[in-house]
Image (cartoon, helix red, strand yellow):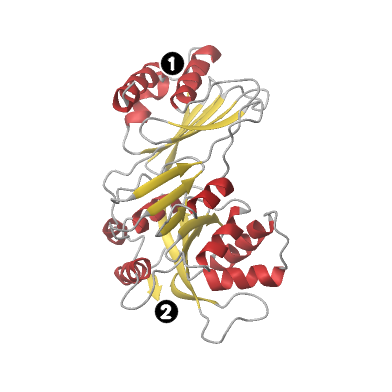
């Protein structure tokens, strides 16, 4: 079947089965839909959690919810199975979906949908809404593109869940030149870059017999043989962090990724932990040196109420050499609370 026809067919099927969340799937302000069994649905709309839907605004039965889960998984080439109680998938519009079945989910089948909303958002919009300052935008643009004789920087975006890391990663990647070959690696493909030369790789979970799995690390190693100009990893979660540090230090500049951390310093210690999760025995001193030499810039993002803000931008300062302990990270931009993003240069 033609891919466009297949996508349209699944869109219609999922819409028909979506019942009480149908309007939320089409609402431009909805960012997350959390279905905790057939009787409880919680929606995040406009940055605010809407009270749980009750009464008629719920699924008719556990089986009607399971029918929706089956359709979502089928679109991603998977199936609902007692042999795989936790699965990731995506909707035809690119929204990320995580499905957990009972008995792993005590409330019954649980579906969490994180909406994919590109909708023309640009970096200039972040300046307009106060998430980013004009000076910080210029700084990041220069770092991504490589100003003058400088090579493009290796950048890590750090923050918690739902802070906008993926959105910022997508926007910064959009600054890359159209003649650059960009390879993206993700657990669930959602970056959807519009650059001219993009190869999008997506990890695959093995089936219940352990067959057919492709990990982020597998894809990263494959990427190094695909002549990338830029490598973008949606999120470093494991031993692939060490592979990425080594690649950054061996000619693959201008790489971008995200990590879960609360500030720019903790982003570095988080990378330490991830590097140590690899199957390579390497001393801590060597890990720290690899990270220090690989990472140029860390962008910290946080959520304050309904707002997603860039709260700090740190730069690795090697002017005094590499210290014996810690990281020579200095903040070049910093925000206090919800105040303005201050230029510290």
For the residues carrying marks 2 and 1, which lies nearer the camera in this image? 2
Q: How far, Cα to Cα, is label 2 from label 1?
A: 54 Å
Q: Earlier in the sequence, mark 2 or mark 1?
A: 1
Q: Splitting the image into 4 quarters, where does residue 48 fall? A: top left
Q: Nearer the viewer, residue 44 or 201?
A: 201
> Where does residue 261 sit, x and y in percent of width and height?
57, 58
Q: Which residue is mark 2?
A: 344
Q: Please, what secondary structure does the residue beneath circle 1 have?
A: loop
> Where does residue 228 sit, x and y in percent of width and height?
42, 56
Image quadrant holding the N terminus, namely top left
Sort mark 2 into few (<14), some (14-19) or many (20+) by Cα contacts within 10 Å. Answer: few
| 105, above or below 306, in the image | above
User: Which residue of the protein is positioned furthest toward the bottom in this rendering?
Assistant: 320
Image quadrant holding the C terminus, namely bottom left
Q: Please, what secondary structure does the residue beneath circle 2 have?
A: loop
Would residue 83 be found to the left or right of residue 214 on screen? right
Which residue is drawn at the image coordinates 60% and 69% (left, top)? 290
Q: Nearer the viewer, residue 281 or 107?
A: 281
Any part of residue 261 in sight:
no
Q: Splitting the image into 4 quarters, where does residue 212 fall? A: top right
| 253, above or below 66, in the image | below
Instruction: Give the numbered dot on residue 252.
Output: none
Sort mark 1 into few (<14), some (14-19) or many (20+) by Cα contacts within 10 Å. Answer: few
Q: Splitting the image into 4 quarters, where does residue 132 fall? A: bottom left
Instruction: Give the numbered dot on residue 56.
Output: 1
> Where does residue 153 sit, x and y in percent of width and height?
42, 69
Any part of residue 316 in sight:
yes
> Where does residue 193 sit, x and y in percent of width and height?
34, 48
Which residue is drawn at the image coordinates 51% and 65% (left, top)? 248
């Amino acid at each position: 079947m033609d891919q466009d026809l297949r996508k349209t067919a699944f869109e219609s099927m999922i819409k028909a089965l979506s019942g009480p969340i149908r309007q939320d799937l089409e609402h431009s302000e909805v960012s997350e839909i959390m279905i905790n069994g057939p009787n409880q649905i919680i929606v995040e709309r406009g940055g605010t959690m809407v009270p749980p839907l009750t009464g008629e605004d719920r699924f008719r039965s556990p089986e009607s919810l399971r029918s929706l889960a089956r359709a979502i998984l089928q679109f991603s080439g998977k199936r609902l199975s007692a042999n795989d109680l936790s699965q990731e998938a995506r909707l035809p519009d690119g929204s990320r979906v995580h499905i957990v079945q009972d008995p792993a989910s005590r409330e019954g089948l649980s579906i969490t949908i994180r909406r994919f909303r590109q909708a023309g958002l640009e970096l200039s919009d972040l300046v307009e809404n106060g998430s980013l300052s004009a000076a910080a935008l210029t700084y990041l643009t220069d770092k991504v593109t490589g100003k003058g004789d400088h090579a493009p920087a290796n950048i890590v975006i750090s923050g918690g869940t739902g802070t906008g890391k993926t959105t910022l990663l997508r926007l910064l990647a959009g600054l890359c030149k159209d003649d650059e070959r960009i390879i993206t690696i993700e657990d669930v493909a959602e970056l959807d870059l519009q650059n001219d030369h993009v190869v999008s790789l997506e990890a695959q979970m093995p089936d219940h017999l352990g067959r057919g799995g492709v990990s982020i690390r597998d894809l990263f190693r494959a990427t190094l043989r695909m002549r990338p100009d830029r490598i973008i990893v949606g999120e470093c979660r494991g031993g692939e962090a060490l592979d990425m540090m080594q690649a950054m230090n061996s000619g693959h500049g201008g790489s971008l990724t995200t990590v879960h951390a609360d500030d720019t310093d903790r982003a570095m210690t988080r990378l330490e932990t991830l590097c140590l999760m690899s199957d390579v025995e390497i001393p801590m001193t060597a890990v720290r040196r690899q990270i220090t030499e690989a990472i140029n810039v860390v962008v910290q993002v946080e959520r304050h109420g309904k707002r997603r803000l860039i709260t700090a931008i740190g730069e690795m300062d090697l002017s005094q050499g590499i210290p014996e302990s810690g990281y020579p990270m200095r903040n070049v931009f910093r925000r206090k609370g919800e105040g303005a993003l201050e230029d510290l240069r």
